[in-house]
Image (tube, helix red, strand yellow):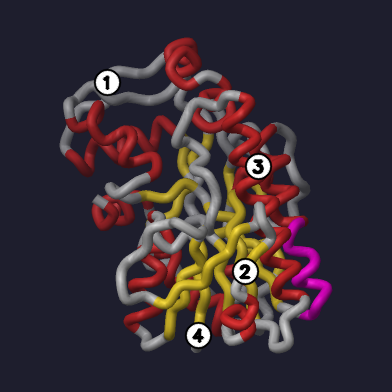
Amino acid sequence: MKIAVSGSTGLIGTALIKNLKSQGHDIVRIARPGGSYPPGEEVMLMDHKTRSIDQKKLDECDIVIHLAGAGIADKRWTDDYKSEILLSRVESTKFLSEALAVSTTPPKLFICASAIGYYGNADADVTFDENSSAGRGFLADVCHQWEAATQTASERGIRVVNLRISAVLSRKGGAIAKMWMPFIMGVGGKLGDGKQMFSWIALDEIPRIIDYIIENELLMGPVNATAPNPVSNAEFTKVFGSVIKRPTIFPVPAFGARLLFGEMADAMLLSGSRVVPKKLLDAGYTFKYGELGPALKASL
């Protein structure tokens, strides 16, 4: 098939394209004008700010996968950066959905990234699945608007999947890359009281999940891309230290996390949620990395 991918040079996009190419699919990279991409690759230019896209190339695609957006944890959350996080997702998704809706030959599937931030944060005894309501807070609001922006494509009759991705385990980026240095130096530890839940997914699991979604036409709407066994922050810290063979006896107090990361600390580090992949499990998907220890070993 011909598959268009935005955010193709990011952490998930790079792993996804490698997997899709290995299966013989033709890849079209959706890129901003002036953006960088590997030479020799087919590119579809899109700019939601000027509302421009190569509609002819879009019409030729069987599947569109939208992963682009400003990094949630790339910068401190100033008002300006929070606005960038929101608009980079909502406006690009809305524009792309509208372009798909007017396509003469619309794709059979539109997969749009979202995040488990949709559910907000809760105590460890609360479990969220795809039937749970949206939570409260900045990230929940971003995810709610992000997913709503795909409505135009859905109304056109395109199968839409909102892939709610949890924290991704990889040395190449995400949470692991940020905590690698203090942990490898032996000064890592739990955050706050360590009771907050940590829902996670191995990077290599995500392309397998997307393959499964492509093959299973009954999967649509929100789909949680998260391993079936979330853990507490304290448990994650213990397993992580065991895998890299380093002590984890230096906890980061809550005030220290807030000093370093501001509002982001309370939203992402000192709180969390127990999220399970009900739709995938009900559909018969078998996780390759369902347990944290083996997933961390593979990811590192």
Q: What residue type is labelled 2?
A: Ile
The vertical placement of 164 against 285, above or below, is above
Q: Is residue 153 within the magenta segment?
A: yes
Determine which residue is flagged by label 2. 53
Q: Mark 1 points at which residue?
A: 249
Q: Nearer the viewer, mark 1 or mark 4?
A: 4
> In whole angstroms, how far apart are the C-alphas of marks 4 and 2?
17 Å
Query: Mark number for residue 86?
Result: 3
Does the CB distance between marks 1 and 3 fall below 8 Å?
A: no
Residue 286, x across and y down, in percent: 46, 72
Identified by mark 4, the residue type is: Lys
Q: Is residue 289 visible?
A: no
First in residue order: circle 4 vs circle 3: 4
Q: Is residue 75 above or below residue 222?
A: above
Residue at 40%, 30% in the rendered image:
234
Q: Position of residue 136 (x, y in %)?
A: 74, 35
Cα distance between the residues tagged 1 and 2: 52 Å
Q: Which segment is the magenta one?
A: 149-157
Q: Which of marks 1 and 2 is in front?
A: 2
The one nearer the camera, 156 or 209, is 156
Return the disc, 4 or 2, that comes first in the chain's sequence.
4
Label 2 CA crowd tier, 10 Å (few <14, some 14–19, many 20+): many
* Amino acid found under the numbered disc labelled 3: Leu
Disc number placed over residue 2 in the picture, else none: 4
